[in-house]
Amino acid sequence: MDALLLARLQFAITTIYHFFFVPLTLGLSIFVALLETKYVRTGDENYKKMTKFWGTIFLINFAIGVVTGIVQEFQFGMNWSEYSRFMGDIFGAPLAIEALLAFYMESTFIGMWIFGWNTLSKKTHLAAAWLVAIGSNISALWILIANSFMQNPVGYGLEDGRATMQDFFALIINPNVLYQFPHVLTAGIAMAGFVVMGFSAWHLLRKHEVAVFRPSFHLAAIFALIGSALVGTIGHFQGQFLVQHQPLKMAAAEALWETEQPAGFSIIAGIDEGAQENSFEFKVPGVLSFLSYNNFTGEVKGLKDLQSEAVAQYGEGNYIPPVALNFWSFRVMVSAGSLMVILALLGVIWSAGKNVIDKRRGFLKALLFAPILPYLAVTFGWVLAETGRWPWIVFGLQKVEDAISPNVPAWNIALSLIIFFVLYTVLTVIAFKLGIKYGKSDIRTKDPVAAE
């Protein structure tokens, strides 16, 4: 294992572990703010209990998310110095704004929210809750603005072998951001809904504080349905955007080796990347054309033709991403997302009727495990987003192999990789155990944050 592979593994591991926590932070911050809004408007103490209860799970998740995210930025200087040299003028600006504006904003108002229950007025405390939610999501926006340049470079010039920023506004309104940020935001909303549904189901099965957890379940089901439906819809249009701007990624996600018109959608396939063919496949005719162009007759270019076009544009090299990884990542993401829509819809229907959800014990038991689905969807969706642009680290401008630090020995990266993996695993296990332990606790004996 050489330094390049080890560096890629290290960044992949830290990113995936970090992303376990990011979507839940985005969605749960909004959910908690909505609950507190309901409390302030109605004066119903049950909504205050909900706000504090789910707010504590948000705080646990937020704390571990911050810890796991810090190391990522260090790696740009340690393992990826050539990337930093090439991209620093552009990549550094949104990261600095994220840290100095959004992160400090959400951190400040989190403190006010935690310690202000007995000192701030209801409306001021509610404002702090919403500023936490806004700050969390603005923070994600700036990170995705930086990432979107790597996916779809805009507003730049090349000077002395470096990318320099020439249009900051173009960076902000990058078309990729307009799809990627709503996609991540709605994924977070869906995840938050399913986490709250899962814990609420646990309490409803045991008839704990039904007056609190029944409305929590219903509101979370609505939240999960909105998020799940929107993330799929936005993902559809994002896929059509990528067909035009990163066609190799989408062809890899379909294991489409030959150009087809119309193009069928492969449900499953036996992928032979060495022979550049599928040993078997089960296709639904015309569906890939529809997904790509909203019609059933459009031509979808295959990997072989796209590889030839890339060679003609960029020079000799292999521009085909890892096909099997992208193919199955896409299917895990879509399958999990589709099941989420079904479960959330059933949750909304059965929780709308009086006492109906309490009798659906089989459904409630299934929902104890349903939060796994959004974690699978967001993890494999992120894998597809990042590995689908290989061999590029900055699409069309810099390859991954050219971005690594030139003088870092492989054993050094291997040692830090092992340390990070062990540390992140321990932190993640602790975070999930804390969240599960708290989520299953009796709300009558717990006062989540700075209780009265």
Image (cartoon, rainbow, N blue to C red):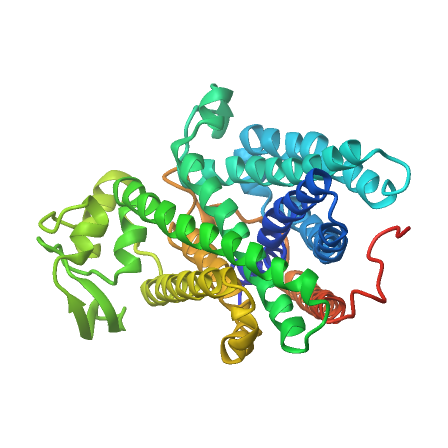
Residue 36 visible in the displayed image? yes
Spot occupied by residue 225 in the image (x, y as percentages of width and height): 46, 55
Q: Nearer the viewer, residue 202 or 55?
A: 202
From what the image shows, is residue 271 above or below residue 303? below
Q: Is residue 403 above or below residue 94?
A: below
Quick check: can you spot residue 319?
A: no
Q: Nearer the viewer, residue 417 or 200?
A: 200
Q: Residue furthest front?
A: 354
Horizontal arrangement in the rendering, residue 400 relative to residue 140 (left or right): left
Q: Is residue 9 left or right of residue 334?
A: right
In front: 367, or 66? 367
Q: Residue at x 82, y 57 (%)?
A: 448
Residue 397, image x, y percentages: 40, 37
Residue 126 % position (x, y): 74, 37
The residue that appears at 53% across and 76% down in the rendered structure is: 359
For residue 68, above or below residue 120: below
Task: Establish if 197 lies above or below 33.
Answer: below
Residue 244: give x, y in percent of width and height: 26, 40
Name the residue: 82% across, 66% down.
444
- How many numbered marks does the figure carry? 0
Please tell me in which quadrant of the rendered image residue 209 appears.
bottom right
